Image (cartoon, helix red, strand yellow):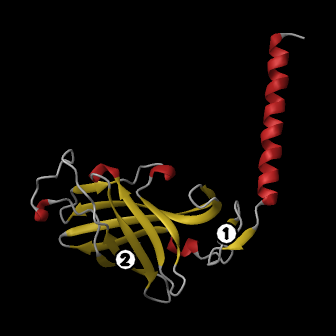
Amino acid sequence: MGNGSIFKTQTMKYIFFIILLSIAISCNAQTYPLRTFTEVPDNSYLKDTNNELPSYEGTWKGQWNGKIIYVMFKKVTYTYKASLNQYRDFLIGRFKVTDLNSSVLFDNTSLPDDQVKIKGLKFGKYDDKYGFTYIDRDLCSRSGEILINFTDTTKTQLQWKYMQSENWINKDCFYHDWAPADVPQPLPENIVLIKQ
């Protein structure tokens, strides 16, 4: 048997092992609805069993302080969240901000799914608000929390609320010495977004 045949056999065994491992993990993961608010076992799957997240998907537009924001939400499924030791379906978001003359101020719409700045968390326990974290490493790791909820039964308008965290800005940050009015503001604090 030549070296090529041995390599081919070992590769096939490895692929077969990975397939069996994937099947075993998916069979062992217990599935719970996305709106489960109790503790779940490790490696459980919080699944969008009620198919709620697709209503948020797509492009949403809003205007504030002489700027226009376009937010694109996308559903991702069966993704492992190491910090929670579980699999989840959740939303991610990308955005582009322009001024009223269409000059681009911020644009992260081409980032891959695993590098987006807006990552979904879950629905609120006592309301229909869906929460996100926002971390922008391009703006000195500015961070905050975003809450969205529909304002109409046709699900064409979203209330958006952004609460910026108290970020400590170190001397290496490009806007460390800027006046507060000049510090970049990529996200609106409170706005209604319209589905496009």
Write down the quadrant of residue 47 in the picture. bottom right
- Give residue 62's position: percent from left, percent from top: 31, 73
Q: Position of residue 78 (x, y in %)?
A: 65, 59
Q: Tell me: 157 left or right of 154.
A: left
Q: Which residue is tagged 1?
A: 47
Q: Quadrant of the N terminus?
A: top right
**Residue occupying the point 43% across, 77% down:** 148
Q: Quadrant of residue 5?
A: top right
As helix, strand or loop, the secondary structure at mark 2 comes to strand
Res 42 quadrant in image: bottom right
Which residue corresponds to the image point at 77% horizontal and 53% vertical from the top-left?
25
Asked whether, in this view, residue 176 is left or right of residue 84, the answer is: left
Picture residue at 59% right of the left edge, 61% below the top: 84
Q: Residues within 10 Å of mark 1 (few under 14, many from 20)?
A: many
Q: Residue 6: x, y in percent?
A: 84, 17
Residue 160: assigned label: 2
- Give whichever of 52, 128 is nearer the camera: 128
Label 2: few (<14), some (14–19) or many (≥20) C-alpha neighbours in 10 Å? many
What type is the residue that disc 2 sits on?
Trp
Sequence order check: which comes first, mark 2 or mark 1?
1
Query: Quick one: 7 or 46, which is closer to the camera?
Result: 46
Is 163 on the left-hand or right-hand side of 120?
Answer: left
Element type at marker 1?
strand
Q: Nearer the viewer, residue 11 or 85?
A: 85
Out of 187 and 35, give the one closest to the viewer: 35
